Image (cartoon, rainbow, N blue to C red):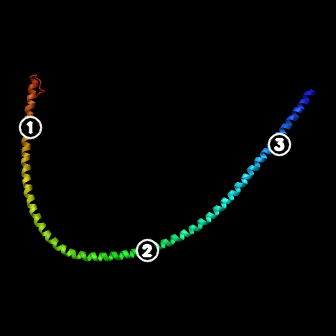
């Protein structure tokens, strides 16, 4: 058993040395990785600080530009409103002047056209009366023609009824005689 204890101790010592060496190697490896990661982190923090400063500067510039733009918009709005007021007043005056001129022209034209319209109305009234008389004559003619056509339709209807009765009688006679009546 002494041999086994001695070999076991050597084996345990070997395992302890291998484990210690592995732990030391892992510690050194992870320490180097941690330092690399830490340097990268510090570089990113520095870059983030620089970008934040640039962003703050851009925000300040944007605020200045927005205030200038707002001032320009206010000035433009005032200018447009004043221009609109002046333009509308000018347009209104021009419109009033044009309306007065049109009224004067229309009054003169109305005076002339009223007389001409009266003359045309009198002529149109005479034409309308003659057209009415002509239409009444045409109506009477068409009424007479319609009555004649109705009489002709009644006559044709009577003939058709007579023919239908004869045809039916022929078919009945043919049927009772036992012949083929389809050709009738």
Whole-percent x and y of residue 84? 42, 73
Label 2 packing within 10 angstroms: few (<14), some (14-19), many (20+): few
Q: Which of marks 1 and 2 is in front?
A: 2
Secondary element at tag 3 = helix
Real-space CA distance between mark 3 and mark 2, rounded to the nearest whole angstrom: 86 Å
- Under circle 2, the secondary element is helix
Residue carrying label 1: 160
The spot of residue 6 in percent (x, y) is 91, 30
Q: Along the horizontal axis of the image, is 178 left or right of 73?
A: left
Q: Is residue 183 above or below residue 112?
A: above
Determine which of the numbered discs, if any, sits on residue 83 in the image. Answer: 2
Q: Nearer the viewer, mark 1 or mark 3?
A: 3
Q: Mark 3 points at which residue?
A: 24
What residue is rendered at 56% in x and 70% in y? 68
> Of callouts 1 and 3, which one flags the residue occurring earlier in the amino acid sequence?
3
Q: Which of 104 and 38 is in front in this view?
A: 38
Q: Quadrant of residue 136?
A: bottom left
- The span from disc 1 to disc 3 (Cα, nearest Å) is 130 Å
- How crowded pointer 3 is (Cα within 10 Å; few <14, some 14-19, many 20+) is rated as few
Residue lying at 72% horizontally and 52% vertically, measured from the top left:
40
**What separation in Å lies between label 1 and label 2 (alpha carbons)?**
90 Å
Q: Upstream in the sequence, badge 1 or badge 2?
A: 2
- Where residue 166 appears, as percent x and y from the top left, is 7, 32
Where residue 141 sits: x, y (%)?
A: 6, 54
Which of the marked residues, 3 or 2, is nearer the chain's N terminus? 3
């Amino acid at each position: 058993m002494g041999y086994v204890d001695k070999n076991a101790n050597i084996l345990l010592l070997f395992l302890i040395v291998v484990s210690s060496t592995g732990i030391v190697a892992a510690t050194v490896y992870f320490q180097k990785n941690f330092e690399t990661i830490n340097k990268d982190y510090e570089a990113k923090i520095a870059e983030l600080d620089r970008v934040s400063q640039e962003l703050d500067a851009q925000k300040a510039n944007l605020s200045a530009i927005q205030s200038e733009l707002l001032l320009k918009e206010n000035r433009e709005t005032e200018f447009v409103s004043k221009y609109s007021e002046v333009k509308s007043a000018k347009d209104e005056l021009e419109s009033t002047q044009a309306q007065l001129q049109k009224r004067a022209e229309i009054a003169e034209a109305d005076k002339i056209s009223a007389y001409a319209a009266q003359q045309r109305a009198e002529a149109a009234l005479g034409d309308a009366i003659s057209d009415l008389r002509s239409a009444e004559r045409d109506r009477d003619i068409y009424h007479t023609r319609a009555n004649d056509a109705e009489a002709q339709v009644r006559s044709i209807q009577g003939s058709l009824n007579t023919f239908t009765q004869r045809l039916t009688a022929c078919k009945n006679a043919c049927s009772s005689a036992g012949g083929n009546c389809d050709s009738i």
